[in-house]
Amino acid sequence: MKLKFSNIIQVLGFMILRLCMICVLLILVVIFYDIITKGIGVVSWEFITKPPVDGMTKGGIYPAIIGTFFITMITAILSVPLGMGCAIFLNEYARDNGLTRFIRMSIRNLSGVPSIVYGLFGVALFVEGCHFGTSILAAGCTLGLMTLPLTITASEEALKTVPRAYREGSLALGATKWQSIWTNVLPYAVPGMLTGTILGLSRAAGETAPILFTGAAFFLPDVPNSVFSQFMALPYHLYIMSTQHHNISLVRPIAYGTALVLIILIFAMNSIAIITRYHLRKKGIAHG
């Protein structure tokens, strides 16, 4: 009787979990269907390769695509090496004491800070303090700081999945600490580290609040010619098309097209993460 009751609880639990999964998938399907059906008619080669014209009521989103690409690259240059390096130090070198635990707690708390707070901090530090002005560099550095906690956390969790025996076996054979990490730990941890990092960059590519204060322009049909130039970006362009334009009903199809292009770019970045993780994990298994 007791065993039968446990089986009923298990079946009910699985049913609830499946129902939750179905609800989430249905919501995603509805959102994607709405964006795709209303945006696919706008997306074309001219839409992707031409600048906006006639008060952004015609033309394309090419400058916004280029601006998004530039700030994402700067974000990656800042957050990836610093985040992975910090994770390696915390997991492999730092002692397990109160200070280390406080640092980890602070990093996790920073992951939950609203993005607009990072935007205000970026204005104070990069725009005013470092004299970058409202520019691609200031916006990229701000997004880099915002992505850093997520990169550190994801990288450290990936390092923790590598068994301690891999390290101890290498050290027992006379390898140095760094040699052990480089040859026996990173090949198995890099797939997870890279996946978390690219997911963080995907989030940064879709943020509006941090770049709103640090360099995004309302209308700038020319492509930026340096990292100190202002820029257009897809998320901010979408925000303008959806809420601030003087004729929202006229440009609504352009807003849907912009949203579709942004989703495709983020999906492409996530696909790269999945494919890269698969190949690196397969290579690590073969190496092992």
Image (cartoon, helix red, strand yellow):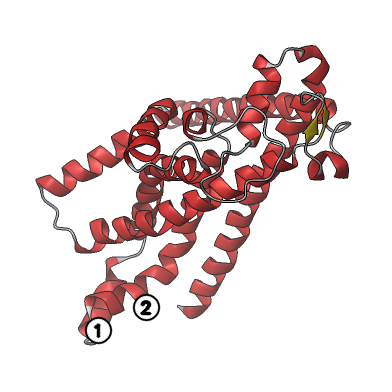
The answer to whether 138 is drawn above or below residue 78 in the figure is above
Q: Are marks 2 and 1 in contact (CB under 8 Å)?
A: yes
- Is 189 drawn above or below residue 96 in the view shown? below
Judging by the rendered image, the residue that carries numbered circle 1 is 175
* Residue tagged 2: 183
Location of residue 220 (image quadrant): top right
Amino acid at dot 1: Ala
| Secondary structure found at label 1 | loop
In which quadrant of the rendered image does the N terminus lie? top left
Q: Position of residue 174 (x, y in %)?
A: 21, 87
Amino acid type, label 2: Thr
Question: Which residue appears at 45% of the width and 64% of the height?
Answer: 190
Q: Nearer the viewer, residue 266 or 11?
A: 266
Say left or right for 189 vs 14: left
**How crowded is the residue under tag 2: few (<14 C-alpha within 10 Å), some, or many (20+)?**
some
Where's residue 283, x and y in %? 54, 74
Q: Is residue 132 above or below residue 4?
A: below
Q: Residue furthest left?
A: 98
Residue ID at (55%, 61%): 277
